[in-house]
């Protein structure tokens, strides 16, 4: 699996050197097991509404750049959760890449000390929202809905984005780590000082979709439980999750919906019989690996991301009813949380992760989000605990 070509550059970079060269707010960094890329500057911003027309418009532009032989024919950036909101996509002035994923060594630097935290909604209000969702499920209006909550943090001084990226990379060796500047006026709002650039930073454990020379890969996660520091208890929780009827039903809803969405785009699609366990430092997940091939060579990774988004893993099912419930029950707009982040080149190849385990940094202000899937049988206290465990990764990376 190769990252986009690097134009004229011949010097050999390492993931660590790319992180050191990152200019937060001006450059975009993407690092996964597939490799690390630093998109420097902005030759062109393609901040278009996230609609069905976006993938085709981006593909046309990248093909034109590639045919002209001048400039980098690749976009890097983020897609918002809400259809119609502005995508933050940039075609860089220069592209640098390195083999392998970012794995920082040496002593960790503190990103910044947290001095204030404000949840939105409060824990009690989140439990009430879960109860309201359970009423909708009991009435037959929904099969599943994902309810998120936000946590606004204030730090002692401006956040060191490079240190935060390094801390996230240390926490989870398999996650896709990113730092992406957001478009001016983009939907992810924070409390930072006016004029401060907004940077989307995270370490996502969930691949939405990748495309490499016609080969499609998607790995949905749904069904989760917090990990334990006690190895015996941790193993017991993993076994309980794999055996949980509630979590397996939640996971099956996601896989079935993604198979329906990918099917029309694929000439073949392999679906395993059941889920497997995936571990992050704070959470166990149920995961299924979907593999296929595209039916049309003009299909791009952005087309596939658009077909899949929003998956029931971050929205719910039926999709329209779930989105309506989210609008009513979540007091804080998601912005880019539960959207997608990644890259796409002129050949259509690319890699997009679901924007979870992420936050928006703006100076000394940070907004985090975490969600939990609500199905029949969900418990408000357990769902609150799940969101708390998911928020722990970024809170600990910030030193909270």
Image (cartoon, grey):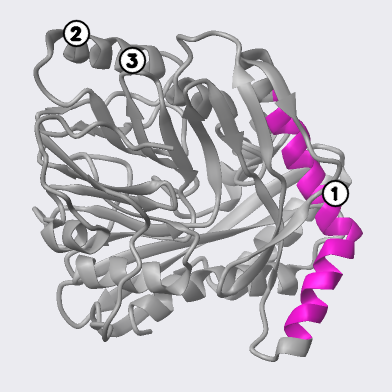
Which residue is painted at 79% across and 76% down in the image?
Answer: 237
- Tag 2 residue: 67
Q: CA distance from mark 2 to mark 3?
A: 12 Å
Whether residue 136 is visible here, answered yes or no, is no
Predominant SS of the magenta segment? helix
Few, some or many residues within 10 Å of mark 3 (<14, 14–19, 20+): many
* Secondary structure category for the residue under label 2: helix
In magenta segment, residue 67: no
Q: What is the span of residues highlighted in magenta in the rendered image?
A: 233-260
Q: Position of residue 336 (x, y in %)?
A: 40, 45
Q: Mark 3 or 1, which is nearer the eye?
A: 3
Q: Is residue 368 visible?
A: yes
Q: Earlier in the sequence, mark 3 or mark 1?
A: 3
Q: Return the residue at label 3.
A: 59
Marks 2/1: CA–CA distance: 48 Å
User: Can you identify the residue that label 1 sits on?
Assistant: 249
Q: In the figure, 190 relative to 34: above or below?
A: below
Foreground mark, 2 or 3, reads: 2
Q: Are marks 2 and 1 in contact (CB under 8 Å)?
A: no
Q: Position of residue 136 (x, y in %)?
A: 79, 46
């Amino acid at each position: 699996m190769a990252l986009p070509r690097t134009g004229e550059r011949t010097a050999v970079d390492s993931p660590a050197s790319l992180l050191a060269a990152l200019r937060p707010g001006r450059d975009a960094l993407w690092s996964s097991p597939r490799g690390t890329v630093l998109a420097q500057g902005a030759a062109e911003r393609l901040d278009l509404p996230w609609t069905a027309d976006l993938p085709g418009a981006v593909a046309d532009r990248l093909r034109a750049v590639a045919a002209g032989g001048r400039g980098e024919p690749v976009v890097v950036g983020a897609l918002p959760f809400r259809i119609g909101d502005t995508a933050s996509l940039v075609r860089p002035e220069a592209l640098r890449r390195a083999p392998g994923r970012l794995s920082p060594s040496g002593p960790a630097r503190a990103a910044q000390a947290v001095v204030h935290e404000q949840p939105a909604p409060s824990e009690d209000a989140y439990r009430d929202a879960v109860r309201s969702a359970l009423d909708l499920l009991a009435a037959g209006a929904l099969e599943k809905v994902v309810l998120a909550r936000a946590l606004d943090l204030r730090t002692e001084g401006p956040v060191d984005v490079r240190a935060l990226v390094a801390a996230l990379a240390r926490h989870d060796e398999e996650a896709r780590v990113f730092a992406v500047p957001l478009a001016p006026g983009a939907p992810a709002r924070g409390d930072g000082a006016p004029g401060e650039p907004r940077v989307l930073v995270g370490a996502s454990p969930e691949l939405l979709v990748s495309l490499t020379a016609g080969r499609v890969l998607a790995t949905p996660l749904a069904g989760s439980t917090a990990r334990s520091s006690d190895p015996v208890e941790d193993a017991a929780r993993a076994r309980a999750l794999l055996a949980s009827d509630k979590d397996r039903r939640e996971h099956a809803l996601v896989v079935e919906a993604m198979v329906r969405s990918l099917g029309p785009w694929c000439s073949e699609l392999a679906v395993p019989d059941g889920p497997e366990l995936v571990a992050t430092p704070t959470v166990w997940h149920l995961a299924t690996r979907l593999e296929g091939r595209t039916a049309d060579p003009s299909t791009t990774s952005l087309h596939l991301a658009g077909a899949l988004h929003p998956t029931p893993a971050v929205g719910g099912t039926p999709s329209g009813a779930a989105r309506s419930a989210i609008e009513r029950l979540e007091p804080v707009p998601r912005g880019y949380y539960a959207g997608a982040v990644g890259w796409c080149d002129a050949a259509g190849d690319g890699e997009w992760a679901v924007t979870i385990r992420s936050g928006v940094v703006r100076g000394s202000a940070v907004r985090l989000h975490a969600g939990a899937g609500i199905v029949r049988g969900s418990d408000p206290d357990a769902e609150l605990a799940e969101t708390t465990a998911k928020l722990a990764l970024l809170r600990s990376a910030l030193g909270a």
